[in-house]
Amino acid sequence: MTRAMKLEMPHDLSPDLAKKAADRAFDAYREKYGSYNPLLTWTSDTHADASFSAKGIKLKGQIDLKPKAIEFDLDVPFLLRIFRNKALEVMERELAFWVAKAKAGEL
């Protein structure tokens, strides 16, 4: 049984900058947590599929770029829900950092 873990990061960026911010946030996550084999594949200009491996279990999710928010959804199996808050904290911190950088013209 899985349950979706959802994070929504508001922004006022152009679509191109929002995508760059999402990419940079995922790259930073990949650098810090490479052992979880994070993968991100853009299937359109506004949608990407994401996957991770944790404790031998593959997690799947997606990133959707909306006009005023970056949405990240991840299906989390019951056994890994104890890590939910930490995962949300890390993702929110990385997205906020890179959205701020994009807004400041630093991407």
Image (tube, rainbow, N blue to C red):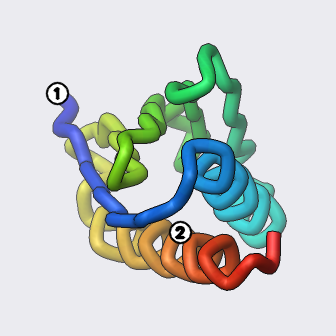
Say which element carries label 2.
Answer: helix
Residue 93 locus on image (x, y percent): 50, 80
Say which element carries label 1.
Answer: loop
Residue 49: numbered disc: none
Q: Amino acid at mark 1?
A: Met
Image height check: is 13 above or below 59? below
Q: CA distance from mark 2 to mark 1?
A: 28 Å
Most foreground residue, 85 or 40: 40
Quadrant occupied by the N terminus: top left
Residue 57 locus on image (x, y percent): 50, 35
Q: Amino acid at mark 2?
A: Leu
- From the image, tell me which residue sits under label 1: 1
- From the image, tell me which residue sits under label 2: 95
Left or right, 21 with respect to 83, comes to right
| Front position among marks 2 and 1 | 2
Image height check: is 48 above or below 68? above
Number of on-image labels: 2
Most foreground residue, 11 or 6: 11
Residue at point 25%, 49% (across, down): 5
Residue 9 locus on image (x, y percent): 36, 64
Structural crowding at the residue carrying mark 2, measured as other residues with C-alpha within 10 Å and reported as few (<14), some (14–19) or many (≥20) = many
Most foreground residue, 23 or 39: 23
Residue at point 45%, 32% (across, down): 62
